[in-house]
Amino acid sequence: MIEIFLKTLPFFALIGLGWQACRSGFFTAEAAAYLTKFVFYFALSAMLFRFAANLSLSEILDWWFVAAYLWGCFVVYAIATAVAFLRGRSIAEAAVEAQCAVIGNTGFLGVPMLIVLMGEAAAGPVLMVLALDLIVFSSLIVILITGSRDGRMSLGIVKTVGMGLIKNPMIVSMVLGLSWSATGMPLPGPVNEFLGILGAAATPGALFAIGASLAGKSAERIEVAGWLSFCKLVLHPAAVAFAALLLFPVPIFDAAVMIAAASLPVAGNIFMLAQHYSVAPQRVSAAILVSTVISILTVSVVIAWVSGMAGIVPGG
């Protein structure tokens, strides 16, 4: 356990460095925004394209894997939604809280950290989790918020969801990478090296950007943030583990990666959605901050458990 903690600590130390740089004023909020844009549109996209281009669709798409992950997600999604309704929250607020309960920081934290710790074989399962989060749940929250305000489904909602997916560089890079893979041609040497160099900036850049984004967040409404963090860091990986290990025939290594991905803290892009739709942004901000701090310990525990279960040597 201590060995795993020491291996995950540098990743969280980079987050802490970004937080301190922005909190002290050395790194401005505007600079942090541009760093995030660089990582999102260039470095992380290059990394995802390169991984996808070297994988086949059959290596990523496993319907039992999809079923297990979605089963675990929707169980926790339903619990978080029910608790929100019991507290008298609206459909829009319940949708945002449920999103916090099941969507982790897979893009900026999971892809760099899990592939380093669990090996490049983890790329396929991690990309599958990322794709499901982006396609299923990013669409669902927009449908629920917009539909609850309009009182009905409309072509406008479908258009908004579709455009959001088409414009997301992570989805675009994965689709383009898999499309290249389908041709059967290897990436030309210079292109592969270019993507490798650019993609290498994703890990430190993304982690620093996470920390910088946390500098402007506060832990107001700590009881709700604590509940949502419990859902994300404990209930979500537990439900996914139950589904992947007991309900569906998911290969043990893929199940380990899926569970590790489910243990990640609340994703930062939920705050952007909450702010865009003016639905509980402070609540989301607090959940991101609290879950990220607590995850320094909980993620290490989960990775240690799944690594032992699947015979993975972290970082080896």
Image (tube, grey):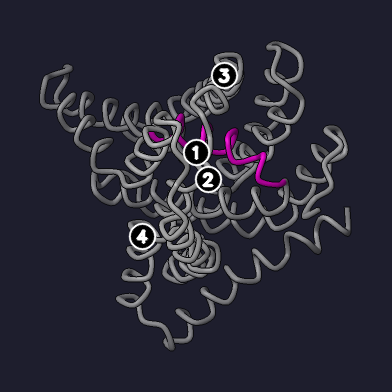
- What's the amino acid at mark 3? Asp
Q: Is mark 3 on a helix, strand or loop?
A: loop
Whole-percent x, y for residue 81 in the image: 46, 26
Does the stretch in magenta take in 133?
Answer: yes
139 relative position to 239: left or right? left
Of the two numbered discs 2 and 1 in the rendering, the one whose residue sits closer to the viewer: 2
Query: Does residue 21 sit above or below 62 in this rendering?
Result: below
Kindly identify which residue carries mark 2.
106
Whether residues under marks 2 and 1 lie with C-beta atoms below 8 angstroms apart, the answer is yes
Residue linked to disc 3:
62
CB contact under 8 Å: marks 4 and 2: no
First-in-chain label (4 vs 3): 4
Residue 198 seen in the figure: yes
Pointer 4 residue: 42
Q: For marks 2 and 3, give the one nearer the viewer.
A: 3
Q: Do the residues labelled 3 and 1 touch (CB within 8 Å)?
A: no
| Circle 4 or circle 1, nearest the eye | 4
Residue at x 87%, y 39% (from the top left corner): 308
Q: Is residue 263 left or right of residue 189?
A: right
Task: State the residue at coordinates (53%, 43%).
Answer: 104
